[in-house]
Structure formats: C-alpha cells, structure tokens
C-alpha cells in the first residue's frame, strides 16, 4: 500500500562535529545507521497548573519506539536553528498553533552507549494553555502529570534515554547542583 506520508528515514538533516559545526547533510536513516552527530531540541511543556506533558512514543518511531518521554521535540532539519526547531516541534507534536516561543534553558551533548545516537541538543521550556491534540503518528498516549508523579514514574516506566539524561540535568540545575550541562 502506497502512502503520501514521507518516510522519516529520508528526511535530510545536518550532521555536525564535536563543536556543533555543520559538516554536511544526510538522510536521517543514514545519520542513525552511521552514528553521525546531529542536532536536537527538547521542550519541556507545562500546563497552567504546572503539570508536565508526558507521552509514550508510537511503536513506529525510528528512534526509541514505544518509550516514554517528558519532552516533545526532535531533530533539527537541515539549516534550521535550535529555536526554530523547538517551536516547530512543540506545535507539531502537541497539535497546537500559536504557542509562545519556548525559553532556552541549557545545551547538552548526548552519546548513546551503542554509538547510534550522538547529539548536540538544547533544552527548552514552554507553558501551554491551549488544548493539545497530539500527533497520532508520533504519540500513542499522553497526559499532563504533576512533577512529583513524573519523578515516581522514572523508575517504573522505560524512558527515552536522551530525554532522561536531559531531565536529570534539568533537575540538578534547579536543585542548585549545577554541574556540566
């Protein structure tokens, strides 16, 4: 059966060096297969009650299928800035338009133990008072959870590993632990 939906593995993305300088472009599937470093934006979404948007990714995702996440976001398109990607990804994944611009919090690098995912990333935060309609292609389940419940679930659910690292760094920074971002 043919589909009008483009294959995410074919999306052209920038790959970068250790200092986040663009070296070239390649399809997403090739970046993952070769472990090329790429750029990502992570957006922590809070509702007016200060609850955090938590979701489970669909089983068809190329990266980390069926795992839970406390960030929306994703890879930057070729030539796209972190700020542009943060807003685009948040609006797409939440199914909203007119979201305020996410606030940048800190940069970080992530290297998966298997070397498949090597990222330069930036963490953002945004408040969303709009009714969300998450993309069914991206998100299988979602809820806004109080942060205390999210923290309890960290040991119960299987989380997207790069998002978990980013969230732990965010918690450490907010607790005054600082440390390298």
Image: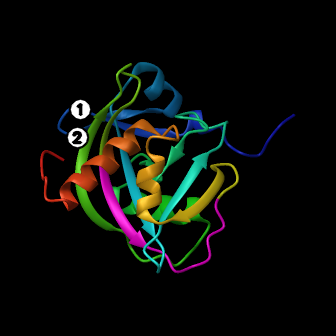
**Vertical side of 4 occupied by 123: above or below:** below
Q: Which residue is mark 2?
A: 20
**Vertical side of 89 occupied by 28: above or below:** above
Residue 131 is covered by the magenta coloring: yes
- Residue 2 position by quadrant: top right
Disc 2 secondary structure class: loop
The circle drawn on residue 17 is 1
Given residues 134 and 11, the one toward you in this image is 134
Instruction: Please report the bounds of the magenta region as a residue range.
Output: 122-134
Q: Residue 91 placed where, x, y %?
A: 53, 66
Q: Residues within 10 Å of mark 1 (few under 14, many from 20)?
A: some
Q: Residue 163 placed where, x, y %?
A: 40, 45
Q: Residue 83 placed where, x, y %?
A: 34, 62
Drawn side of residue 118 relative to residue 153, left or right: left
Residue 136 is covered by the magenta coloring: no
Gap in Å between the C-alphas at discs 1 and 2? 5 Å
**Vertical side of 129 occupied by 39: above or below:** above
- Residue 161 position by quadrant: top left
- Residue depicted at 60% across the width and 39% down the height: 8
**Where the N terminus falls, by quadrant?**
top right
């Amino acid at each position: 059966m043919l589909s009008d939906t483009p294959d995410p593995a074919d999306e052209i993305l920038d790959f970068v060096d250790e200092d986040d300088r663009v070296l070239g472009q390649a399809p997403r599937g090739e970046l993952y297969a070769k472990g090329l470093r790429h750029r990502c934006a992570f957006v922590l979404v809070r509702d007016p009650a200060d609850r955090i948007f938590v979701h489970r990714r669909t089983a068809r995702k190329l990266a980390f299928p069926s795992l839970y996440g406390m960030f929306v976001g994703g890879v930057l398109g070729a030539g796209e800035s972190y700020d542009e990607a943060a807003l685009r990804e948040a609006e797409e994944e939440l199914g909203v338009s007119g979201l305020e611009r996410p606030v940048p919090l800190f940069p970080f690098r992530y290297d998966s133990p298997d070397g498949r995912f090597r990222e330069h990333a930036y963490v953002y935060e945004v408040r969303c008072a709009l009714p969300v309609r998450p993309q069914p292609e991206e998100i299988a389940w979602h809820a806004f959870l109080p942060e205390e419940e999210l923290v309890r679930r960290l040991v119960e659910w299987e989380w997207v590993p790069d998002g978990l690292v980013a969230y732990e760094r965010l918690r450490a920074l907010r607790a005054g632990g600082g440390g390298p971002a």
